[in-house]
Image (cartoon, grey):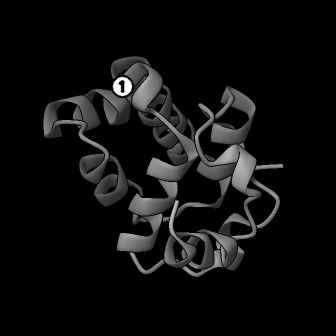
Amino acid sequence: MSVGALNVYGQWGVPEHLLHTIPSNQQLNRLASRLGSEWEMMLLDLGLSPGELYRCRADHPLSVQSQVLAGLVMWKQLQGRGATVQRLLQSLQALDLHPSAIDQVFV
């Protein structure tokens, strides 16, 4: 990993040793609780289809957090070993989300 990459991910407060790990469902739930309307763009960036997003919304019509969590779990299942903390951070960075939004998510 380059020094530039460390600086980018260091600003998110995520330890380097966690970047290549697959996030736990507990970590995904913490992240889901902190995302707002940007969640759909993030999941599309992560590779979910509009149809898969629709399914998340339809399966959990009363809870945005449950919709987001369902999408994140689906992403993790579809991507397998490619579903890393680093990939999530790349997607969050693309949304210009402030690093404080994920404070204490990946601990």
x, y (%) of residue 19?
A: 62, 48
Q: Secondary structure at mark 1?
A: helix
**In this view of the protein, which residue sits in the foreground, 35 or 86?**
86
Residue at the spot x=42%, y=61% of the render?
90
x, y (%) of residue 50?
A: 15, 40
Residue at the spot x=36%, y=31% of the render?
56
Residue at the spot x=29%, y=59% of the render?
41
**In this view of the protein, which residue sits in the foreground, 29 or 9?**
9
x, y (%) of residue 107?
A: 84, 49
**In this view of the protein, which residue sits in the foreground, 71 or 105?**
105
Residue linked to disc 1:
79
Left or right: residue 4 compared with residue 28: left
Left or right: residue 82 compared with residue 24: left
x, y (%) of residue 85?
A: 57, 46
Residue 12 vertical position relative to residue 46 in the rendered view, above or below:
below
At label 1, counting other C-alpha atoms closer than 10 Å, the crowd grade (few under 14, some 14-19, many 20 or more) is some
Residue 77 vertical position relative to residue 3 in the rendered view, above or below:
above
Please, what is the three-letter code of the amino acid marked with disc 1? Gln
